[in-house]
Amino acid sequence: MDLNRNLTNDEILAIPEVEDALNDGKIMVIHKEDTSHPDYVNMYFIGIVKGLSSSNTDVNSLQAQLLGWKGTMPMRAIQNSSKAIADQVALGAMFDGTIRVFDTLTKQFDAQTSRIDRNGKQLLHQGKPIYRNTEICDFATLERLGHDTLEVDRTPVQKPQSSGQVAGSEVNGSPNASVNTLLGNQA
């Protein structure tokens, strides 16, 4: 398998044995990269995430069915590893585990960008930008902690400006706004 972090999720899932393994509750190593510390390596994983709430999309379960949303999505996580262990793990290696999703109101690393909607508007919780994070974990940890996502404000959504400032713009208050947007306003 020719794997690397620059492949799209669709390209990775197009490999039949990968999609089957991920659907069977595995996570897979798709890339390894040296860090600034010679004893550590970043390992890049892909997995199928289940159970994320769609409550912040204004789409109910019937609408999700009509949109073809399955309630699962491929997501990635980066895990730091000792070089000695990472050297023993081949690209394409599978692990029993999953990816846990959690949101924060602060950046977890300098280059992290906040969540945006399909129109490029920044998503906020209590007026603050939301930062989405992922981590690999075992199933018992996910069962205990669950995904920890923040509810998106229903009031003004902000669009980031290049200066780092945010400018306000009003959200369409229609409950079908998300579905109409997704269907090109043909709903």
Image (cartoon, rainbow, N blue to C red):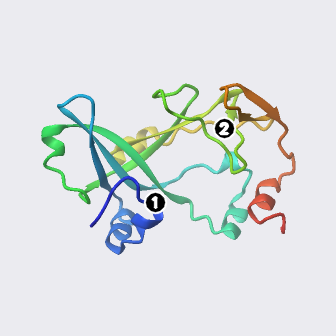
Q: Nearer the viewer, residue 185 or 135?
A: 185
**Residue 97 appears left or right of 38:** right
**Quarter assignment of residue 127:** top right
Locate residue 57, reporting x and y percent: 70, 50
**Quarter assignment of residue 109:** top left
Q: What amino acid type should be assigned to the residue bearing mark 2? A: Glu
**Residue 164 appears left or right of 104:** right
Locate residue 55, reporting x and y percent: 67, 47
Q: What amino acid type should be assigned to the residue bearing mark 1? A: Thr
Disc on the earlier residue, 1 or 2: 1
**Quarter assignment of residue 157:** top right
- At x 34%, y 67%, the residue is 18
| Residue 8 circle label | 1
**Up-down relation of residue 19 to residue 86 (above or below):** below
- At x 68%, y 67%, the residue is 67
Q: Are marks 1 and 2 in contact (CB under 8 Å)?
A: no
SS category of the residue bearing label 2: loop
Q: Quadrant of the C terminus?
A: bottom right
- At x 48%, y 27%, the residue is 110
Count of labels in the image: 2
Furthest toward the bottom, the residue is: 16
Locate residue 79, reporting x and y percent: 32, 40
Q: Nearer the viewer, residue 61 or 82?
A: 82
The span from disc 1 to disc 2 (Cα, nearest Å) is 27 Å
Q: Residues within 10 Å of mark 2 (few under 14, many from 20)?
A: some
| Residue 151 circle label | 2
SS category of the residue bearing label 1: loop
